[in-house]
Amino acid sequence: MNPIRATEDRLFKITACTRPFRAAGPRIEAERIGDQLVVHNYGHGGSGWSLSWGSGTIALDLALAGRDPSLTDIAVIGCGAIGLTSAILAQRAGCRSVTIYAKDRPNDSRSFRATGSWTPFSRIALRKDATPAFAAQWERMTRTSWRYYQDFHGKPGAPIEFNDRFYLSDAHPDVDEQQKIDNDPIGFVNYRDRIADIASAVEDLAPGTHPFPTQWARRRSELMFNITAYVRQLTEEFERNGGKIVLREFHAPAEFAELPQPVILHSTGYAARQLFADDSLTPVRGQIGWLIPQPEVNYGLYLGTLGVLARKDGIVVQLNPQGEASGWNDAGEQPDRAEAEAGVRQLRALYARMKPSAGA
């Protein structure tokens, strides 16, 4: 196993973002605002990229109900994970014209700062608020997205690929995973069992069979987004098929009336809290420290509060001191250098404790 060169001077970037969480799950519903049909699609917590094709499909079905797509002009508000994907879905459905209106281009959006993991079950809803109907909808979104992602394997730049993740613990991995669920102070719902057939391949490495400084290591082969390449491919497809990105910020829903399109797909993520005065959105802060890429490294490591994932555009290092509850109700997006360096030091300490004679 090739080691990551975990030194503070290799941090070339630190990014922070706000994840848009809703206790009942994402808002995917239509409403009339003046003469326009507005379909909302936001509030995916830590699952935006993972669920984008599935949630976009549901939103587009609402937008096109009873309409001839070949005669329909569509506006998309926002061009993060959900907006960009929804715009492409509208094009593929045959809509006559699709225009994205957004404050920033895709590579400046909050979605661009995501870790890049396939995590459709991450911070998706609260157990006390999620209904059986939502659970079924979530599974539909997840399976739909999974099918779409298969088309991206093997494409230039590897926008989507599988790699190994090692989940390290002294307790048996089943016990460790259950303890994390039981000790979750927020009460996030966990639907992993509903997609056990597609989630990942799992192998438990018993004590003495791996190089890690823990009793157990669980190896999962999981899907990963190389977000730089993935966003580039999506943007190029959208613009190649005649789509336009217009830089514009909206401050109130009434401003939608200034757009010529009769149908609007609204996907501004956390910005919807202010735009629509939607207090159902709770911010969840996340930060990533970026280490210089190492082409020979292609795996992830997770131990306690530390998460690491090697991507082609950088090795992302993240500290989550409260697990999934880390960053809860914190809308701050100012990078914290001390936090990033602490993560790098933890990673370096992990390698210092590894056993060079064993192999994974």
Image (tube, rainbow, N blue to C red):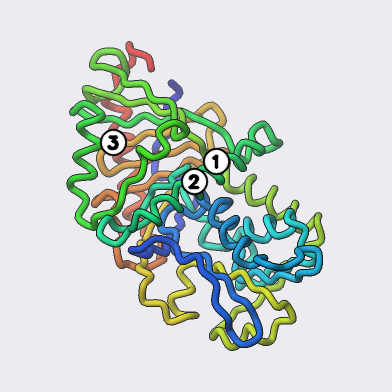
Helix, strand, or loop for circle 3?
A: strand
Helix, strand, or loop for circle 2?
A: helix
At 32% from the left and 46% from the top, the residue drawn is 190
Q: CA distance from mark 2 to mark 3?
A: 26 Å
Q: Look at the picture and state if 168 lies above or below 341.
A: above
* Residue holding disc 2: 142
Question: Which quarter of the picture shows residue 36?
Answer: bottom right
Q: Amino acid at mark 3?
A: Leu
* Residue holding disc 1: 146
Instruction: Check contact, mark 2 vs mark 3: CB within 8 A.
Output: no
Q: Is the residue marked by circle 1 packed among few (<14), some (14-19), or many (20+) residues within 10 Å?
A: many
Instruction: Check contact, mark 2 vs mark 1: CB within 8 A.
Output: yes
Label 3 vs 1, first from the N-terminus: 1
Label 2 vs 3, first from the N-terminus: 2
Residue 303's disc is: 3
Question: Which quarter of the picture shows residue 245?
Answer: bottom right
Q: From the viewer's perspective, is the residue at label 3 or at label 1 nearer?
A: 1
Q: Look at the picture and state if 300 lies above or below 253.
A: above
Q: Nearer the viewer, residue 283 or 150?
A: 150
Q: Residue 252 location, x and y as percent?
A: 54, 86
Q: Is the residue marked by circle 2 packed among few (<14), some (14-19), or many (20+) residues within 10 Å?
A: many
Q: Residue furthest front?
A: 66
Residue 233's disc is: none
Q: Is the residue marked by circle 3 packed among few (<14), some (14-19), or many (20+) residues within 10 Å?
A: some
Q: Amino acid at mark 2?
A: Thr
Q: Residue 124 location, x and y as percent?
A: 38, 55
Question: Which quarter of the picture shows residue 338?
Answer: bottom left
At 55% from the left and 67% from the top, the residue drawn is 267
At 63% from the left and 56% from the top, the residue drawn is 85
Q: Nearer the viewer, residue 341 or 158?
A: 158
Q: Residue 48 location, x and y as percent?
A: 49, 55
